[in-house]
Amino acid sequence: MHGLKLRDEFLGKHLKGTAIEIANSRNSGAVQQPADKFLEITYPTADLLRAIDSVGQSHGRPVVLIGERGMGKSHLLASLHHALKSPEVTSNWLDQWDSRISARPALRPSMHVISESLHRQKFPSLWEVLFDHHPRGPEVRGMFKAKGTDWPGPDLIMELVNHTPTAILLDEFQTWFDGLGNDPKAPHRSRAFGFIQVLSEVAKEVPDKLVLVISVRNGSSDAYQQIHRVSPILIDFHAAGAPEQIQRDRRNMLLHRLFTNRRHVPVDAIEKSISVHVSEYFRLLSVPAAEQDRRRDEFLQSWPFAPHLFQLLEDQILVASDAQETRDLIRILAGLFKSKGESQPILTAADFSLEDDDSGITALLDSVANEAHRDLREKAMRNQTAVMDSVANHRESIPHLRQILPALWLRSISADNQVGADPAILHADITHEKVVDDNSFQIEIAGIEENGFNIHRDGKRLVFRREENPQAKLLQAARNDRLFQVGQDLAMLAKVLRYAFEGDAGSTGLHRVLPLPRAWQVDPWSQFSETDKPAAWADLKIPVLVVPEDLDKLDLTLGRFLKDHLQTRRNTVRFLLPRTGTTSLYQDRDLLVMARAIVKAEEWGSSFNTLKLRYQKELAEVLRGRFTRFAILSKWSFTDSGACRFHLEAVDAQGTKALEAIKEQVHRNLFVQEDFEELVVAAAGEGKSLGSLLRELQEPRPNGQECIPWLGEAEMKDRVVLQCARGNIAINLRGSEFLQLLPGETPASASQRLKSRLVVTGRQLDEVT
């Protein structure tokens, strides 16, 4: 943009605050810098020139700067410091601006300058500022202590300034004064009240030796009233004046503060680059021909920002907020220029980006204290998403969506009756170097209005309002990725998935359904509670691990998982798998939106309970139909995961019925009774305990043998009892009795009798052989 350069302080990734520090421990404060360096970023506003003139020798009164935070009092105070301490450097600076200064202020000879920002309450007594920073301060401090008065009198102040003429500049005086206590034993406020009168009177009586300048926020405080008695010179940042001159002065100051070379860019080059925008602005807003020259001059003065953007920020945004005026405005404009300054010939409200915090939005939101106004940005973003989701080919049919919505949002946080925007100004906002066809723009506006559920008509004006459809609000929150960066949506998706298969049985069921997390191959367990981690699987429920994605190399992947992440009970696991070709559970946008809707409905309370139940039901139904296969270990190799093999079976049933179907299929198709009998008889021959046998069955068989599926502790004990009832083995029940088939007894009746006797669990199993 014509080589326009931001000052170095605005070039970092994060914009620094523009607050002026008078002094600090790093020696980088405004009065600690060389005068020429500080004055280089200073524009000679009418207030500044008047202040410099007020501390000249031709005046004999204290000077008071009145203005709220962020309006430039500290900057002006620092400029006075340099003018009083370095008049030659200040004179050279004024020479550079000579063509723009109508009445040049007279500078007095160099003085000893004491500048202090009092807001940190370092000084309980104001005279300590003088004693600490004046060449003769220590000596006069001793004289004061010897006198024993409540505060130094005029004679002691004269001792100081006769020795060395002094200027005292006190920033944040009102903040300091209001923070003083007035305890009878330590009446700091009363003493400060008396001492400031002494300083004021001496400054008035001997203006060639003492200059006093203070800054306050308003003229109604006690801090100001004592100085007011000597009729100080007021520099009031809120004072009325010629509106056009004040506006011109202010904008020139802002542009000089932002850019190193703004005043050196040729006017004709600016005029040429913004000609399309200006002419369209005049046409769309029907600017009378008689006013066009004046308005064109405003565009040239305000460049690279459009004057209607300045007006919007100054007259509406900053008035609608608790913004610190100039300070915040500088940060907002710097962020906007960094974001779009190189790509646009002129910057308007349409160049802010709702999604990009670096476009000046962050600085703008930081300056807005009204929560209702802040909420509108989120609503605007949700509306943007709604339009994109609802309008097919929105990039072609609504190409300026990301420009129109920010402009409308900005114009909807106004404090006055003109909240919102006429479509004509929005049309002008999005016009830069190319004309936007009227018909195309009307189509865009219609599409945005129809699908933006927070956009309302107020006569001809469009406006964002807070009222919205609860369902639309919920869905738009669900589509906002920034609201779910800590994984609440993934946790809810897993929670609903678990419920979809466990149902109300939950903790009492035979199965433990564990939806594996997104990083399941690396860190499968950290997101589970302690009661669900493998170390707590002592209750011997059958773990059903839900794999979130389709697997290309199922045997290798699941084998490696068992090797890396399960040290025991590897043979007990069932893997529930999604349909072939499905995307990862945690990357399916539709599923995530439903899970997020549930999260937000819970967060927002009972008024959203109906929607919460609705989306829980819908999500559970989708998830039940998504998982149609299961895998169970067939052959195991600890040394080579690629040699592991799994049975892969289809599941026709859904939800809790799917778990029953898996159980039946394992019993019917995968459990080989002969292998089990052989293992049980061998264990009997070796004198193994029942507990040892059950633990062995929970682990894969070695040497590539076909694994015997684990059916759960109760089922496995029943099958051992069945071998006893058939006469294949006998059971020594903890040394108290032998369980075995009796002569003439049928296996069926023996089984019923033996089951009633073998009622042992836990450690007792190791006492049964």
Image (cartoon, rainbow, N blue to C red):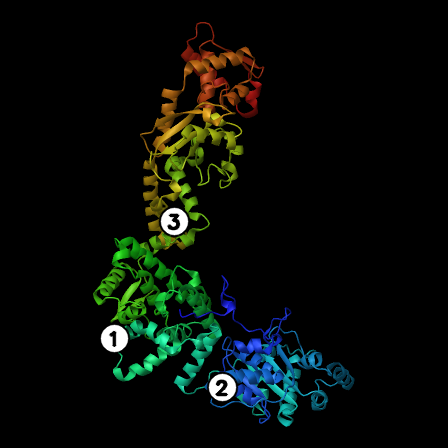
Q: Is residue 507 left or right of residue 40?
A: left
N-terminal of the two: label 3 or label 1?
1
Q: Residue furthest right?
A: 146
- Compared to residue 336, the image places residue 740 above or below, namely above
Q: Marks 3/2: CA distance?
A: 63 Å
Name the residue tied to disc 1.
283
SS at badge 2: helix
SS at badge 1: helix
For the point 57% across and 87% down, which residue is it? Answer: 63
Q: Amino acid at mark 1?
A: Arg
Name the residue tied to disc 3.
596
Q: Is residue 445 left or right of residue 696?
A: left
Q: Amino acid at mark 3?
A: Arg
Give the number of the disc on residue 98. 2
Q: Residue 421 occupies which quadrant of the picture?
A: bottom left
- Compared to residue 470, the image places residue 307 above or below, namely below
Q: Nearer the viewer, mark 2 or mark 1?
A: 2
Q: Residue 164 occupies which quadrant of the picture?
A: bottom right
Front residue of this view, candidates 670 and 332 = 332
Q: Nearer the viewer, mark 3 or mark 2?
A: 2
Give the number of the disc on residue 611. none
Determine if residue 413 is in view. yes
N-terminal of the two: label 2 or label 1?
2
Q: Marks 2/1: CA distance?
A: 38 Å
Q: Is residue 173 left or right of residue 368?
A: right
In the rendering, at what x and y percent does residue 383 appear?
32, 59
